[in-house]
Each structure stands twice: as structure tokens, then as C-alpha cells.
């Protein structure tokens, strides 16, 4: 679990930084630019894909050097070994994705209107 906090924090940091740059670009130009649109559409999946590639590259030496690093008596467990590394790569990607989505949610909380009885009432009336 501790090893998977790093992709979560990295996804969170990269997405928050990207949204901050997007807001700075919007402040200078006066409108939301193409960078903000690109962030909304592709940032989370890009970070998850990059995390999966990174996890694969971290596991690659063990996968490649299986015959040298692992005792020959463990050879029947090679398939289980590969399945566990695939699960590790998928978990790494999901934790990075959850960090990115958390950052996205945090940035949208700031943009939400202040809650009051008036805004809640108007939201209820509009949903009828």
C-alpha cells in the first residue's frame, strides 16, 4: 500500500500543477484556452497510461532476468509471477488515475458556487 501512494501523489501533483497553469493561462488571456479543454479531456487517462508504462519499466528487469534471479525450483510459479506483475501495473495505473481525479475534483470544488439556502432551493426547483 505504501508503494502505491507514490503514483497517487504524483497524479495529484501533476494534475493540480497542470490545472494551475491552465488557470494562469486563462487569467492572462481572459478565457479558457485549448490547454484547459485538453486537460479536461485527456489528463487523467494520460497520467494513468504513463503510470502503467512506468510500473512496467520498473518490473522489466525482474521479468527479463527471471532465469537468473529466481531459483529454478520456482519455475512452475512463473505464470503466477507474471499475473501478479500485471496486477501491480494495473494497480499502479489506477492509483495514478485516482490521484488525478482527486485533483480534478479539488479544482472543481473551488469553481462551485457558494452553498446557501437560496442556491440549494434554486437547484431543487430547476431539477423538477
Image: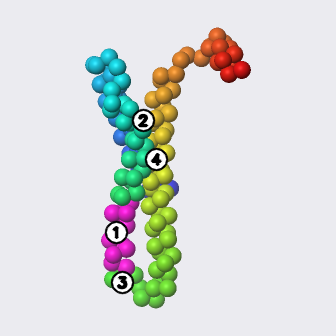
Q: Is residue 100 above or below residue 88?
A: above
- Kindly identify which residue carries mark 4: 97
Q: Which residues are magenta?
A: 55-67
Question: Would residue 49 be visible to someone looking at this image?
Answer: yes
- Kindly identify which residue carries mark 1: 60
- Kindly identify which residue carries mark 2: 40
Badge 4 crowding class, 10 Å Cα cut-off, few under 14, some 14 to 19, many 20 or more, is: many
Q: CA distance from mark 1 to mark 4?
A: 22 Å
Q: Is residue 50 above or below residue 64?
A: above
Question: Would residue 16 be visible to someone looking at this image?
Answer: no
- Kindly identify which residue carries mark 3: 67
Q: CA distance from mark 2 to mark 4?
A: 13 Å
Quarter assignment of residue 125: top right
What percent of the width, then of the height, locates residue 88? Answer: 47, 62
Q: Mark 2 or mark 3, which is nearer the start of the sequence? A: 2
Badge 3 crowding class, 10 Å Cα cut-off, few under 14, some 14 to 19, many 20 or more, is: few
Label the magenta part by its dominant secondary structure: helix
Amino acid at each position: 500500500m505504501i508503494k502505491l501512494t507514490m503514483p497517487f501523489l504524483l497524479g495529484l501533483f501533476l494534475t493540480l500543477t497542470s490545472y494551475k497553469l491552465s488557470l494562469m493561462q486563462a487569467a492572462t488571456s481572459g478565457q479558457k484556452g485549448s490547454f484547459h479543454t485538453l486537460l479536461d479531456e485527456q489528463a487523467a487517462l494520460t497520467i494513468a497510461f504513463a503510470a502503467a508504462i512506468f510500473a512496467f519499466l520498473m518490473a522489466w528487469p525482474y521479468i527479463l532476468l527471471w532465469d537468473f534471479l529466481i531459483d529454478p525450483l520456482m519455475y512452475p510459479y512463473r505464470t503466477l509471477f507474471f499475473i501478479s506483475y500485471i496486477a501491480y501495473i494495473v494497480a499502479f495505473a489506477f492509483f495514478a488515475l485516482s490521484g488525478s481525479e482527486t485533483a480534478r475534483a479539488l479544482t472543481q470544488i473551488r469553481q462551485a458556487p457558494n452553498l446557501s439556502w437560496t442556491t440549494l432551493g434554486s437547484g431543487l426547483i430547476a431539477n423538477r
